[in-house]
Image (tube, rainbow, N blue to C red):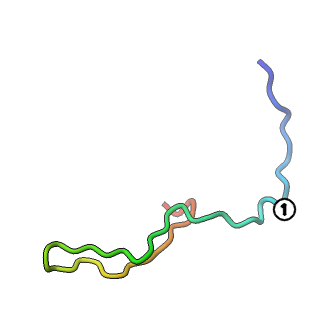
Amino acid sequence: MWQAPLRSLDPILLEVPMAPAITVDHLYKSYGDTVAVDDLSFEVEPGEI
């Protein structure tokens, strides 16, 4: 089976920031009249979980 030759990674490409794996903006959750979460925002970067 044919395999592509191995090449070293381009150092310039390694410096490009990656987009967050998860982004949550202004999350709101309530149960009836009880507010559990109000305006929660966060990001999880690749490799953090």
Q: Is residue 2 above or below residue 33?
A: above
Q: Quadrant of residue 18?
A: bottom right
Residue 26: x %, y % from top left: 40, 78
The N terminus sits in image quarter: top right
Question: Dot 1: within a 10 Å radius of its alpha carbon, few (fewer than 14), some, or many (20 or more) residues?
Answer: few
Q: Is residue 7 above or below residue 35?
A: above
Residue at image position (48%, 60%) is 49
Please name the amino acid that badge 1 sits on.
Ile
Q: Is residue 15 left or right of residue 44?
A: right
Residue situated furthest top in the rendering: 1
Residue 41: x %, y % from top left: 43, 77
Residue at image position (62%, 64%) is 19
Residue ID for mark 1: 12
Residue situated furthest left in the rendering: 32
Q: Secondary structure at mark 1?
A: helix
Q: Quadrant of residue 21?
A: bottom right
Residue at image position (80%, 27%) is 3
Report the front residue among 32 and 43: 32
Residue at image position (84%, 59%) is 11
Q: Is residue 13 left or right of residue 33?
A: right
Q: Is residue 10 left or right of residue 19?
A: right
Q: Is residue 4 left or right of residue 32?
A: right
Residue 17: x %, y % from top left: 70, 67
Q: How many marks?
A: 1
Q: Quadrant of residue 7?
A: top right
Residue 34: x %, y % from top left: 16, 79
